[in-house]
Image: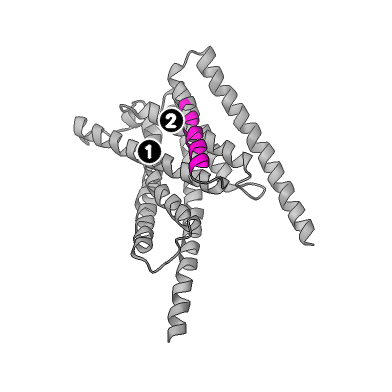
């Protein structure tokens, strides 16, 4: 029975792997086509991002650990840190230079492009391609429809189409604020893999506080507000694919955020259980 279940899970993983690898290859071909045949040299930032994070992968694998999950998580932490700093810098620069007035107007969010926003989005897109391939190569996923692979696929579709058409770039930069929360997700994962699991320590408690605060404000609230803004400004969109694509992307992100919130709460309860058990034993 156990062998049958294991074999079934392996078949699910193989099917998922083939599908997501095929979509990644198609995505790569489309990017190369845009760069070479449509002379979109600005898209080279996507290739630069993929190469940068792959090099980071090799460095960590050579100097720190060869564990695929540790390496993948460490590179993800690097991406979240770089992207968060970049988004905060772009927003702060824009605010200081032009003020808040007009910064979040429909024309700015859809047709405008803040300074450094385009290469930042390209660079992050390159990371998602790298991460998708890394997880496929080392089978860091499970199930017939792995949520993490689906998440990356949705992002790659939304990001690259926006980059090709040069629209909604600023909207997508706003969505990347969620990487602030991803920092603490990856810190927690690396910390646990390093063997630091004392839920009573001040560092772990602080980590959980920051984890929840950034989940609420940088991920959940921000994405809900972006969705509300899209729905409010729906009549201002043209007849193209921008609005349906944006709503589809945000619906996917909000669904994944809800699932992530449930997983985060379960993880929090599991980490608090040893402490409660110890307290009860003392009594």
Distance between the alpha carbons at the discs numbered 1 and 2: 10 Å
Residue placed at 49% from the left, 54% from the top? 260
The percent position of residue 155, horizontal first and vertical second, equals: 50, 37
The quadrant of the rendering that contains the N terminus is: bottom right
The percent position of residue 22, horizontal first and vertical second, equals: 65, 32
Q: Is residue 266 left or right of residue 20?
A: left
- Way the structure is coloured: one colour
Graded by Cα atoms within 10 Å as few (under 14), some (14 to 19) or many (20 or more), the crowding at tag 1 reads some
Q: In which quarter of the image is residue 205?
A: bottom left
Check disc 2 and report its element: helix, strand or loop. helix
Task: Residue 223: give its label.
Answer: none
Residue linked to disc 1: 82
Examine the rendered structure and indicate whether residue 167 appears above or below residue 75. above
Sequence-wise, the earlier of marks 1 and 2 is 1
Residue linked to disc 2: 123
Q: In which quarter of the image is residue 138?
A: top right
What segment is highlighted magenta in the picture?
A: 48-63
Residue placed at 57% from the left, 26% from the top? 28
The percent position of residue 31, horizontal first and vertical second, equals: 54, 23
* Residue 225 counted in the magenta span: no
Q: Given contact means CB atoms under 8 Å apart, are the residues at marks 1 and 2 in contact? A: yes
Q: Quadrant of residue 30?
A: top right
* Residue 50 counted in the magenta span: yes
């Amino acid at each position: 029975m156990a062998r049958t279940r294991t074999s079934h899970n392996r078949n699910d993983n193989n099917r998922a792997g083939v599908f997501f690898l095929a979509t990644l290859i198609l995505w790569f071909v489309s990017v190369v086509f845009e760069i070479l045949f449509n002379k979109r040299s600005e898209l080279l930032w996507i290739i630069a991002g993929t190469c940068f994070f792959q090099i980071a992968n090799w460095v960590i694998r050579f100097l720190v650990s060869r564990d695929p999950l540790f390496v993948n998580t460490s590179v993800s932490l690097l991406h979240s840190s770089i992207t968060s700093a970049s988004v905060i810098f772009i927003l702060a620069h824009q605010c200081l230079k032009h003020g808040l007035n007009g910064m979040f107007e429909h024309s700015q969010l859809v047709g405008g492009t803040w300074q450094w926003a385009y290469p930042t989005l390209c660079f992050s897109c390159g990371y998602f391609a790298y991460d998708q391939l890394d997880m496929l190569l080392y089978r860091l996923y499970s199930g017939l429809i792995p949520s993490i692979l689906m998440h990356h696929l949705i992002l790659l579709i939304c990001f690259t189409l926006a980059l090709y058409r040069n629209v909604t770039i600023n909207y997508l930069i706003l969505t990347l604020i969620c990487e602030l929360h991803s920092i603490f997700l990856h810190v927690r994962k690396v910390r646990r893999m390093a063997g630091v699991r004392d839920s009573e320590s001040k560092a772990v408690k602080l980590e959980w506080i920051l984890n929840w605060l950034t989940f609420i404000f940088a991920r959940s609230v921000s994405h809900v507000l972006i969705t509300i803004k899209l729905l409010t400004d729906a009549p201002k969109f043209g007849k193209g694919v921008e609005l349906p694509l944006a709503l589809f992307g945000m619906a996917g992100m909000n669904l994944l955020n809800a699932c992530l919130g449930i997983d985060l709460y379960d993880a929090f309860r599991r980490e608090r259980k040893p402490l409660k058990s110890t307290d009860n034993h003392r009594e």
